[in-house]
C-alpha cells in the first residue's frame, strides 16, 4: 500500500477505535440492576430520632438501620435548603454548582432560584447519560423540570397554581396524570388530632412571623401529603432504577413547633451564660413532646418505600441539616457549626449495623454513582462512603474515577422567571428564609 493511502487508512482505524471506547465509556460496569430509593427528609435530626427509637415509635427507621449503615451527615454553611440539596445532588459545594441562595436577580428583580442556574450535573443527569432510569420528585431547585431518562416532578409542582404549566414536570403530560389531594379545614383538624399534632400551633405570645407560619401550616402539610401520594403513584406505576424524593414537613414543623415549648423553660435557658449537655437534653425532651408526631408521620412515609422494596432494593435516607437549641432558639442557620443531618444506607449492598462517623452530604451522590458502577468525578468535593459497604464488595468492585462528568453541561447559569415567582417568594418569607 502506498504511504499516501496508508496514513489516512490508519487515521480512520484510530478514529473508529477511539469512537468505540468513547461510546462505551459511559456504560456502567456489568452488574445486576436493582432499585434504589433515595428519601430526603429535610431537617431530620438524630437528637429527636434516637429517643423515639428507644421508645420503639419509629419501626421503619429501625428496620432500615438494622439492615445498613447510619450516622450523622455533616452539613455546610450556609444551611439553606436550596444550596444544600443541590450539593447533595451534585457532590459539590456551591462554588462549583452555582446555587448560592434562595433567590437570584433577573432584570433588576428578585426571583426565586431556579435549576437553570446550576452549572454542574446532578445525579439524574449522569444517570441519564449512562442509560440508568431515574425518577425525581420535589427535589429543591428542579424547576424547570429537566429531560431525564425517566421522569421529574419539580419542586414547583407542590404549588397548586403551577400544576397546568408544561415545565413543571417531565414529561410535560405527567402532571395531569398525578393524583391531586385536597383537604378542608375540618379534615385537617381531624388529621391533626388523629396524629397528635399540637391543636394550638403557637403560643399566645408570638411574633408576626410565627403567626404567619402557623396560619400557613395546613398548606405545608398538604404539600407534603401531596408529594407522598405522588410518590406512591409513581413507585407503583412508573418503575425506575433510581427514585429520589424530598419531603419538607420535618423542617417546616421544627421551625414552627419550638415556639410552643414552655416559655418559662425557654426563658430559663436564655438566662444562662452557657448551656450544659443536661440543659440541651432538657430542651430536646421538651421539644420532642411536641414534635414527635411529625417524626412518627415521617416513619410512615419510609414505610411506603419499604412496602415496595424487595430483597434487592437499597434505600438511602438523608437530611440536609438537623436542628439544635443555640442562641436561645431552635434552628440551623446563623450558628457556629451547622447541626448535622442524618444518613442511613440500607439494603443488601451495605454492612448491617455499621455506624458512620465522617459522612458529609457531599458524599451522597459519589456513593450513588459507585453503587451504579459509574465513575466518580475527581472534581467532586465528596467521596463514596466505602465504609458502608462490605470490604469484599469494595475489593471486587474497585471504584473508577474520571476528571469530571460535566462535559457538555452548561457553563453559565441564568435564573428563570414565571408568574409563580411572587407565590414562591412569599413562601420563602413565611419560612423566614428571606426578608
Image (tube, rainbow, N blue to C red):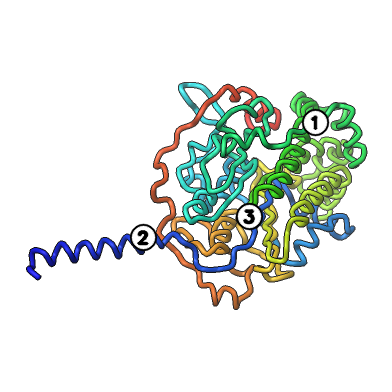
Tell me where residue 387 sits by quadrant: bottom right
In the picture of the structure, the residue carrying the numbered disc 3 is 74
**Position of the N terminus by quadrant:** bottom left
Position in image of residue 277 (x %, y %): 80, 55
In the picture of the structure, the residue carrying the numbered disc 2 is 22
Instruction: Give SS at disc 1.
Output: helix
Is 261 rendered above or below residue 243?
A: above
What is the C-alpha distance between the residues marked 2 and 1?
52 Å
Q: Are marks 2 and 1 in contact (CB under 8 Å)?
A: no
- Residue 340 in view, yes or no: no
Q: Are marks 3 and 2 in contact (CB under 8 Å)?
A: no
Question: Of tags 3 and 2, which is closer to the observer?
Answer: 2
Horizontal relation, residue 92 to residue 292: left or right: left
Tell me where residue 113 sits by quadrant: top right
Is 29 rendered above or below residue 342?
A: below
Horizontal relation, residue 189 to residue 385: left or right: right
Horizontal relation, residue 312 to residue 375: left or right: right
Depth order, front residue of 129/258: 129
Sequence-first disc among 2 and 1: 2
- Mark 2 Cα shell of 10 Å, populated few (<14), some (14-19), many (≥20): few
Question: Of tags 2 and 1, which is closer to the observer?
Answer: 2
Q: Are marks 3 and 1 in contact (CB under 8 Å)?
A: no
Sequence-first disc among 3 and 2: 2
What is the C-alpha distance between the residues marked 3 and 1?
31 Å
The residue sitting at 62% across, 51% down in the picture is 75
Instruction: Give SS at disc 2.
Output: helix
Depth order, front residue of 118/79: 118
Position in image of residue 179 (x %, y %): 73, 36
- Residue 377 in view, yes or no: yes
- Mark 3 Cα shell of 10 Å, populated few (<14), some (14-19), many (≥20): many
Q: Which disc number belongs to residue 218?
A: 1
Amino acid at each position: 500500500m502506498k504511504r499516501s493511502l496508508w496514513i489516512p487508512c490508519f487515521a480512520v482505524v484510530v478514529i473508529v477505535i477511539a469512537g468505540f471506547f468513547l461510546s462505551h465509556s459511559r456504560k456502567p460496569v456489568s452488574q445486576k440492576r436493582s432499585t434504589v430509593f433515595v428519601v430526603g427528609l429535610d431537617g431530620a435530626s438524630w437528637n429527636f430520632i434516637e429517643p423515639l427509637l428507644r421508645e420503639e415509635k419509629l419501626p421503619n427507621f429501625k428496620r432500615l438501620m438494622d439492615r445498613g449503615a447510619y450516622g450523622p451527615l455533616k452539613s455546610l454553611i450556609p444551611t439553606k435548603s436550596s444550596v444544600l440539596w443541590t450539593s447533595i445532588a451534585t457532590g459539590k459545594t456551591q462554588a462549583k454548582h452555582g446555587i448560592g441562595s434562595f433567590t437570584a436577580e433577573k432584570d433588576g428583580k428578585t426571583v426565586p432560584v431556579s435549576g437553570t442556574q446550576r452549572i454542574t450535573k446532578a445525579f439524574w443527569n449522569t444517570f441519564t447519560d449512562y442509560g440508568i432510569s431515574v425518577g425525581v420528585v420535589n427535589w429543591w431547585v428542579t424547576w424547570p423540570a429537566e429531560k431525564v431518562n425517566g421522569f421529574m416532578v419539580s419542586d414547583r409542582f407542590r404549588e397548586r397554581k403551577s400544576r397546568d404549566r408544561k415545565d413543571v414536570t417531565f414529561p410535560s403530560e405527567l402532571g395531569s396524570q398525578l393524583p391531586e389531594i385536597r383537604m378542608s379545614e375540618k379534615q385537617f383538624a381531624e388529621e391533626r388530632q388523629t396524629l397528635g399534632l399540637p391543636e394550638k400551633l403557637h403560643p399566645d405570645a408570638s411574633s408576626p412571623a410565627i403567626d404567619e407560619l402557623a396560619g400557613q401550616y395546613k398548606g405545608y402539610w398538604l404539600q407534603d401529603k401531596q408529594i407522598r401520594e405522588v410518590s406512591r403513584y409513581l413507585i407503583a406505576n412508573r418503575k425506575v432504577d433510581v427514585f429520589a424524593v424530598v419531603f419538607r414537613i420535618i423542617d417546616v414543623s421544627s421551625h414552627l413547633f419550638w415556639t410552643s415549648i414552655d416559655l418559662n423553660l425557654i426563658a430559663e435557658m436564655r438566662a444562662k451564660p452557657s448551656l450544659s449537655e443536661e440543659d440541651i437534653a432538657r430542651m430536646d425532651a421538651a421539644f420532642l413532646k411536641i414534635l414527635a408526631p411529625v417524626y412518627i408521620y415521617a416513619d410512615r412515609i419510609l414505610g411506603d418505600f419499604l412496602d415496595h422494596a424487595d430483597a434487592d432494593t437499597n434505600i438511602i435516607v438523608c437530611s440536609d441539616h438537623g436542628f439544635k437549641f443555640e442562641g436561645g432558639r431552635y434552628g440551623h442557620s446563623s450558628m457556629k457549626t451547622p447541626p448535622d443531618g442524618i444518613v442511613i444506607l440500607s439494603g443488601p449492598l451495605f454492612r448491617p449495623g455499621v455506624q458512620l462517623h465522617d459522612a458529609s452530604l457531599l458524599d451522597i451522590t459519589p456513593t450513588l454513582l459507585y453503587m451504579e458502577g459509574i465513575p466518580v468525578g475527581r472534581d467532586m468535593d465528596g467521596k463514596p462512603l466505602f465504609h458502608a459497604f462490605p470490604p469484599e464488595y469494595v475489593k471486587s468492585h474497585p471504584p473508577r474515577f474520571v476528571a469530571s462528568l460535566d462535559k457538555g453541561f452548561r457553563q453559565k447559569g441564568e435564573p428563570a422567571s414565571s408568574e409563580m415567582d411572587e407565590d414562591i417568594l412569599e413562601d420563602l418569607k413565611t419560612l423566614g428564609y428571606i426578608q
